[in-house]
Amino acid sequence: VQLQASGGGLVQPGGSLRLSCKASGNPGTIAWFRQAPGKEREAVSCLRRGDGYKGYAASVRGRFTISRDKADNTVYLQMNGLKPDDTALYYCATRPGNIITGRCLDQGVYDTWGQGTLVTVSS
């Protein structure tokens, strides 16, 4: 499986962006992570393959929405109400099969990563 992330860009505070993570092959659970300059990589959201469970980090819950287009083998991250603190390099990652709920946002369980796409929130 290979992943290709896209959709990043420059947006003003309060604006929206939609990131895409297109998978080749048969991806399992897919998650988004981000890394801001000078900070550690952190989880953003995950989408479990089997039952479609969706997990969100507290910092983005209510503003970001993860979804999947099975026909296109693409996972989207709709980001609304963007804040300067959302500025980061965003990565998507996957692992085969399902995962227990408590580890859906654990970056250590993902073994395939795409390249990052840069999101900059600034006026």
Image (cartoon, rainbow, N blue to C red):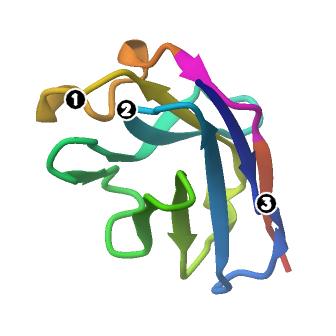
Q: Secondary structure at mark 3?
A: loop
Q: Quadrant of residue 120?
A: bottom right
Mark 2 / mark 1, whichever is N-terminal: 2
SS majority, magenta: loop
Q: Residues within 10 Å of mark 2 (few under 14, many from 20)?
A: many
1 or 3: mark nearer the eye: 1
Q: Magenta segment range?
A: 112-116
Task: Please tell me which residue lies in front, 91 or 99.
Answer: 99
Quadrant housing residue 8 = bottom right
Picture layout, residue 60 above or below residue 95: below
Report the Cα–Cα distance between label 2 and label 3.
23 Å
The numbered mark, 1 or 3, whose residue comes first in the sequence reads 3
Query: Badges 2 and 1: C-beta atoms under 8 Å apart?
Result: yes
Task: Please state which amino acid type lies under the numbered disc 1.
Answer: Asn
Q: Is residue 70 left or right of residue 117?
A: left
- Amino acid beneath label 3: Gly
Q: For mark 3, does the 10 Å Cα neighbourhood hold few (<14), some (14 to 19), or many (20 or more) residues?
A: some
- Residue extending farthest to the bottom is 14
At x 54% / y 80%, what residue is drawn?
80
Q: Amino acid at mark 2?
A: Gly
Q: Nearer the viewer, residue 41 or 18?
A: 18
Q: Is residue 111 left or right of residue 87?
A: left
Say which mark, if any, is on residue 8.
3
Residue to which mark 2 is pinned: 28
Q: What is the distance, in whole Å, between disc 1 and disc 3 at their CAs?
A: 28 Å
Q: Position of residue 79 (x, y in %)?
A: 55, 72
Q: Which residue is mark 1?
A: 98
Quarter of the image with the C terminus is bottom right
Residue 4 position within the rendered picture, expressed as x and y whole percent measured from the top left: 73, 40
Q: At 19% from the left edge and 42% from the top edge, which residue is drawn?
A: 50
